[in-house]
Image: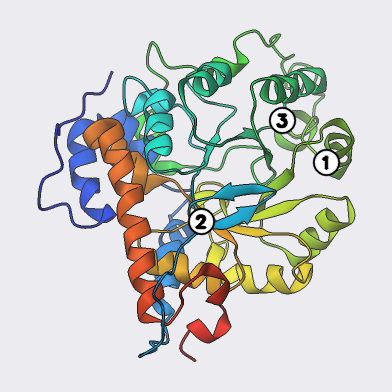
Amino acid sequence: MPTPCLSAIPRDIACVADYERYARHSLDDNAWAYLASGAGDELTYRRNRDAFDALRLQGRVLGDVGGGHTRLELFGQALAHPILLAPVAYQRLFHDAGELAAAQAAEALEAAMVVSTLASVPLEDIAAATRAPLWFQLYIQPDRGYTRHLVARAEAAGYRALVVTVDAPINGLRNVEQRAGFHLPPGVEAANLRDMPPPPNPLAHLRPGQSPLFDGLLATAPTWADIEALRGLTRLPLILKGILSPADARQALALGVDGLVVSNHGGRTLDTLPAAIEALPAVADAVGGDIPLLLDGGIRRGTDILKALALGARAVLVGRPWVYGLAAAGPLGAAHAIKVLREELEVAMALTGCATLADIGPATLWR
């Protein structure tokens, strides 16, 4: 199992990007290929960053921002700030305690944590180990009965929202992982799926001329009918993660979904998609403020968070930055990464004249 290389935060870690080189030192080539790569030529992976860098903020002076704060209410939940820990699979690849260490960091920083279906620690154990608000990220399984079982487990364990990932019915072609021969090492598994009956081989009954992808792997892929069924199954807030299309946003709204995460899966599924922040304005126009939007992908600075909120997001999901911190310094590093982002957000708010999140809007961006 990986061992963090830091027992304290050194002075040369001033921003979350500084954790990356320490994380690389802590992780082997196998774990690094999984964490720090994207699909194809990694154009979308890089564009998530480049698009943020292209946006400019409008500075404001002499405003009264005393007493400002980052508090918000989201899906009926009071949160201290709009930074959530994104769902990340197999966290024991990065720290021996995996999701338990991340949950410890989330609690320390009063951050909501989204727990992956593919967590390497059972969802019940994570819930028992933290007081942080927990949401459950769901991959709809080929066995829809087992999918319902996962939802029931999350509800029973006290999870406060259901985040259904809809943009990855199949894995993206991640060439970096392929070249590295990525594999799950002994002791790392999808702990929440341990008792799931083995699915039938989707390729076993293909006839000559049929496509292994369309007639095999995708034969049981989720559809809008599954979202409609989930809406009738649970009273938890139902959030779809992986929306880039305004048409998809409108369809989700029509089915009674409670929120959307604008995301391209961190550039890990289909290469040459737009950056998430580029897709956000059109999705925001499509839903017209009827449901909250969250933004996932490319966040590395507090100024990025401010830009996302200015373009219509209510909160953001952050993945790789705190995972780099986790790999480098355990729960201390993960917590410090979130702390740095929150502090940067507060500074950016003050210098753009925004005392609260409600003050952030299109005028916060320079045109």
Drawn side of residue 258 relative to residue 88, left or right: right
- Foreground disc of the pair 1, 2: 2
Q: CA distance from mark 3 to mark 1?
A: 19 Å
Q: CA distance from mark 2 to mark 3?
A: 37 Å
- Which residue is labeled 1 in the image? 227
Crowd rating for badge 2 (residues with CA inside 10 Å; few <14, some 14–19, many 20+): many
> Are dots 2 and 3 in contact, CB under 8 Å?
no
Drawn side of residue 317 relative to residue 233, left or right: left
Q: CA distance from mark 1 to mark 2?
A: 26 Å
- Which residue is labeled 3 in the image? 217
Which residue occupies the extreme left position in the image?
11
- Foreground disc of the pair 3, 1: 1
**Residue 264 or residue 350, whichever sits in front:** 350
Q: Residue at x 79, y 30 (%)?
A: 220
Residue 47 seen in this snapshot: no
Crowd rating for badge 3 (residues with CA inside 10 Å; few <14, some 14–19, many 20+): some
Residue 49 seen in this snapshot: yes
Q: Residue at x 32, y 41 (%)?
A: 335
- Which residue is labeled 2 in the image? 82
- Secondary element at tag 1: helix
Figure quadrant of residue 122: top right
Image location of residue 212, percent across then percent down: 71, 31
Q: What amino acid is at disc 2? A: Pro
**Residue 33 or residue 18, whichever sits in front:** 18
Quarter of the image with the N terminus in it: top left
Asked if 143 appears above or below 251 in the picture, the reply is: above
- Secondary element at tag 2: loop
Drawn side of residue 11 relative to residue 304, left or right: left
For marks 1 and 2 on the same chain, the one whose residue lies earlier in the sequence: 2
